[in-house]
């Protein structure tokens, strides 16, 4: 399978990430066919060994733990974002094969990936690739643009982890990508700058122009109010007001690499917060079902 291309090695000893909390049920019942559009899964180390270049050790959770979370939350389907501890995509491909039609995947790729490997990933359920512009690991912006041209015929998208306040410098580049562009984690806004900050306004324009999507996920990553994350509310609400048809929701389970001092979030609270951002059932169905079905190529709920 294709090498994901990370070559940087974090100095040892590696720190093991904390285990996620046992989730409670959310404040509302999700609509039938709801999708968690951003999560990571981990498997048996014996079957799925970690890459020697990994910079973290995941918590002691496996696929069944995530399936249990879905049952608690009332979520039926999910999108697995490649976990950087793995040198290939064997785990997510195996899980997607074991649950036909229920899951999709987002890969992490090097430009050296072959066309045959791309076709294999697509057949297995992968529908996009991720570029992490925050950590510096993996493919960069220019490489992502080149790779985007190669996956255009597959109908894939490119997913970016970036800080919104870097957007004014690259928004025109993203708008010219030949594939759909997805921005992680509410754009990782600067909560001290507010929704009028230039970068966040650039994000709103990208969505309104129909050139991008955004994930309503991981508010705890940039919030200064822990727990609760209420300082993210104005940003998420602005996104919902600007482009409700370009948004998906994600748990970011199992919440690896938390900054020191940040408490582990409860996934029931994270899903409950969507009711604050999208206060009507119609909006929540759009964000949890209709939009991710379209973006990731799931079958429409009830149609097989």
Image (tube, rainbow, N blue to C red):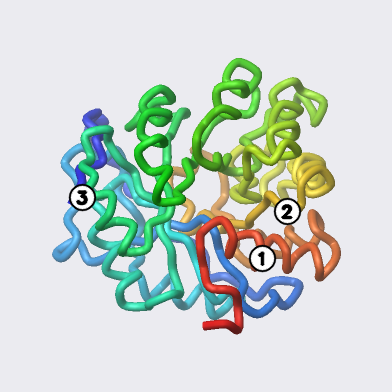
- Distance in Å between CA atoms under marks 1 and 2: 8 Å
Q: Which is more N-terminal, label 2 or label 1?
A: 2
| Side of 203 where 218 appears, left or right | left
Q: Residues within 10 Å of mark 2 (few under 14, many from 20)?
A: many
Looking at the rendered structure, the number of numbered marks drawn on it comes to 3
Residue at which label 2 appears: 245
Seen from the viewer's position, the closer of residues 178 and 128 is: 178
**Residue linked to disc 3:** 116
Q: Separation of disc 3 and disc 2 at Cα?
A: 33 Å
> For mark 3, does the 10 Å Cα neighbourhood hold few (<14), some (14 to 19), or many (20 or more) residues?
few
**Residue at x-position 77% and y-position 46%:** 243
Q: Secondary structure at mark 1?
A: helix
Depicted 191 relative to depicted 159: above or below: above
- Report if the CB atoms under discs 1 and 2 are less than 8 Å apart: yes
Tell me which residue sits at (73%, 68%) in the image: 285
User: Compared to 194, does 24 lie above or below?
Assistant: below
Q: Quadrant of residue 99?
A: bottom left
Marks 1 and 3, the one that precedes in the sequence: 3
- Is 10 in front, or is 5? 5
Q: Residue at x 81, y 68 (%)?
A: 282
Residue that numbered label 1 is attached to: 290
* Residue 63 visible somewhere in the drawing: yes
- Circle 2: element type: helix
- In the image, taking residue 156 as reference, residue 110 lies left or right, namely left
Q: Is residue 231 above or below residue 116?
A: above
């Amino acid at each position: 399978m294709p090498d994901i291309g990370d070559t940087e090695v974090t100095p040892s000893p590696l720190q093991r990430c904390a285990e996620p909390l046992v989730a409670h049920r959310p404040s509302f019942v999700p609509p039938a066919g709801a999708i968690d559009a951003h999560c990571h899964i981990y498997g048996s180390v014996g079957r799925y060994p970690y890459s020697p270049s990994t910079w973290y050790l995941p918590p002691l959770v496996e696929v069944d733990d995530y399936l249990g979370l879905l049952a608690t939350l009332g979520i039926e389907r999910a999108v697995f974002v490649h976990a950087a501890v793995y040198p290939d995509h064997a785990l997510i491909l195996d899980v997607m094969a074991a649950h036909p039609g229920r899951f999709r995947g987002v890969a992490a790729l090097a430009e050296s990936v072959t066309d045959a490997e791309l076709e294999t990933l697509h057949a297995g359920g992968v529908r996009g690739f991720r570029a992490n512009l925050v950590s510096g690991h993996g493919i960069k912006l220019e490489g992502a643009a080149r790779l985007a041209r190669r996956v255009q015929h597959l109908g894939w998208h490119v997913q970016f982890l970036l800080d919104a306040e870097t957007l004014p410098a690259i928004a025109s580049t993203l708008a010219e990508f030949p594939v759909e562009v997805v921005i992680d984690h509410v754009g990782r806004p600067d909560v001290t700058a507010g929704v009028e900050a230039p970068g966040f306004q650039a994000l709103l324009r990208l969505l309104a122009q129909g050139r991008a999507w955004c994930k309503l996920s991981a508010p705890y990553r940039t919030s200064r109010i822990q727990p609760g994350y209420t300082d993210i509310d104005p940003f998420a609400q602005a996104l919902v007001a600007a482009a409700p048809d370009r948004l998906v929701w994600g748990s970011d389970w199992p919440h690896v690499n938390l900054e020191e001092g940040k408490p582990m979030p409860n996934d029931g609270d994270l899903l409950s917060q969507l009711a604050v951002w999208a206060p009507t059932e119609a909006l929540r169905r759009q964000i949890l079902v209709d939009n991710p079905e379209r973006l990731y190529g799931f079958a429409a709920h009830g149609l097989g």
